[in-house]
Image (spheres, rainbow, N blue to C red):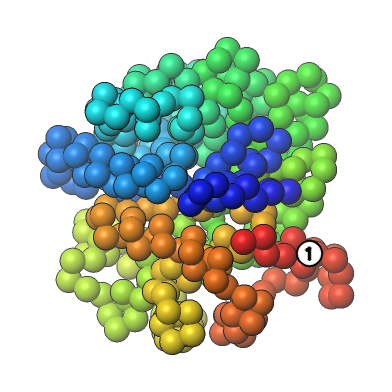
Amino acid sequence: MSSLLVGDEMSFRMLGNTGLQVSVLSFGFWATFGAKPGMKDDEGVQKAKDIMRIARQNGVNLFDNAETYGNPQGAAETVMGKALKQLRDEDPSLWRRSDIIITTKIFWGGAGVNEKGLSRKHINEGMTASLTRLQCDYVDLVFCHRPDPYTPTATVVRAMSDLVRSGKATCWGTSEWSAQQITEAFFIAKMEGHEPPQMEQPQYNMFHRDRFEREYFPLFRAPYNIGTTIWSPLKSGLITGKYNEGIPADSRMNTPGYEWLRARLDAFIADGSIEKVKMLTAYALDEVQCTVSQLAIAWALKNKNVSTVLLGATKISQIEENLGALKVAVRLTDTHMKAIEDILSNKPESFNGPGGSGPRALKCLI
């Protein structure tokens, strides 16, 4: 299980069995930089630097990316690589490679039939390409971005283990794998003497809870002790309150390529979830004196099985607001958490069934 380590400002948790301390808030490049059609390269790099600098100055030490992020694919890694190099040149002490954690994910690498998936060929070639774009000799964490139904798990385990033992990554994990797939990979690694998966990157937020809180519950205990880097704590912006009264003109929902997000909003409205966001917005302001975005991120942080929450931002105001969630998490009491649960009314049944011990996984550490 993740333990909480408190520094001067930012808090840190151990990432599973990796031995790495990760800031409880981290920064991810999904749908941020390198993903804007028409954005000039230098403009993207400068914006990324501005956001990353603020994140780092506030104690963030983990920066997440993937080979598929950006338009065209890989552009987000290119932007991040350039930004990191410039930031390191400007302030070497703040951006020591030994003190920050860089991640990438392998699965969707290109249009060709062998440029995607988790074959040994693509894992090797995908990692080489990512390291080139990131301008790094190695990444700290590499994830299998999705399970590959066409490649035997044993093949994936061996290829990922080889990445670690070659020095191209320090450890490997999964993203959106089922608990069964993770345990299969874990025991294949143990039986064959390979490096096991040590972390998972799942979606987790107030409206997407069952897999994390129920299905994964056994994975947070020995022998697995899986660490987690959760994504979409604001459910692609649906929990920010910006859509409570409709779609703003400058919303990314109006951007070509984001039609899927509009469909998600329509479903969110249809099932009544948007009404819960409205109630949460009012509760955050009146009872906790924070924004609903900060409340949602703080709520995720209260789960001790969350090693770090990936934040996404393209504006300085957004990253500053989101970083403020750490102080909100410290203020949240059991009374607050119960009130939030009453509004959500979607808490999954515990792993051990009614009356079981599963809810122990949700005890607060912050």
Q: Left or right? Give the position of 175 relative to 232.
A: right
Q: Amino acid at mark 1?
A: Arg
Residue 130 at x, y percent in the picture? 40, 25
Q: Residue furthest front?
A: 8
Residue ID at (41%, 69%): 293
> Which is nearer the eye, 28 or 20?
20
> Which is nearer the eye, 78 or 16?
16
| As drawn, 333 above or below 113 | below
Residue 117 seen from this side: no
Residue 80 at x, y percent in the picture? 31, 34
Q: Residue furthest top?
A: 166
Residue 253 seen from this side: yes
Circle 1 sits in a helix, a strand or a loop, which is it? Answer: helix
Residue 82 at x, y percent in the picture? 26, 28
Q: Left or right? Give the position of 51 relative to 175.
A: left
Residue ID at (35%, 63%): 321
- Give the residue number, with chain letter if any, for mark 1: 360
Q: Left or right? Give the position of 330 relative to 335.
A: left
- Mark 1 neighbour class, 10 Å CA radius: few under 14, some 14 to 19, many 20 or more: few
Residue 81 at x, y percent in the picture? 31, 28
